[in-house]
Image: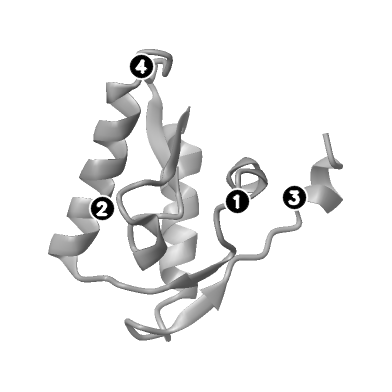
Amino acid sequence: MVDAWSYGYPRILTIDRNKQRLDQRRNESQTRYYDNPANPDPRPGQDLDEYPPAMFVENYGRAHVRPINESQNRGAGAVIGRLLEPYSDGDKVEIITNYEELFGNS
């Protein structure tokens, strides 16, 4: 997330769990990733991570995508999903991390 923020991706996001639109955003983001020959293919045990996640309107099918450990990606997705259960589609949420506190600004 932090590297995506450095490229100007938003921290305030709008929830949209509609399965068809969510899948479309994810597919478009991943297609754009694979269409760039400079991007590495994920290695075994990696998923393509996207920010903003596909469940947010601001993904627009143009998310910041990179390969990461599949367990970390799926675990983070599950945590975000659980945290947002009380919220409805159309609600805006702000993504906040303690990355800088844990890892510094490097």
Q: Name the front one of labels 2 and 3.
A: 2
Q: Are marks 2 and 1 in contact (CB under 8 Å)?
A: no
Q: Name the front one of labels 1 and 3.
A: 1
Q: Residues within 10 Å of mark 1 (few under 14, many from 20)?
A: few
Task: Specify the amino acid type for callout 4.
Answer: Asp
Report x, y in % for residue 96.
Answer: 67, 65
Element type at marker 1? Answer: loop
Element type at marker 2? Answer: helix
Residue at image position (19%, 53%) is 23
- Tag shown at residue 25: 2
- The image quadrant that residue 41 belongs to is top left
Q: How far separated are the C-alphas under marks 2 and 1?
A: 18 Å
Horizontal side of residue 105 vs 3, given as left or right:
right
Q: Earlier in the sequence, mark 3 or mark 4?
A: 4
| Res 4 visible | yes
State which quarter of the image contains the C terminus.
Answer: top right
- Tag shown at residue 41: 4
Residue 72's place in the image compared with 55, above or below, is above
- Residue underneath mark 1: 8
Q: Residues within 10 Å of mark 3 (few under 14, many from 20)?
A: few
Element type at marker 3? Answer: helix
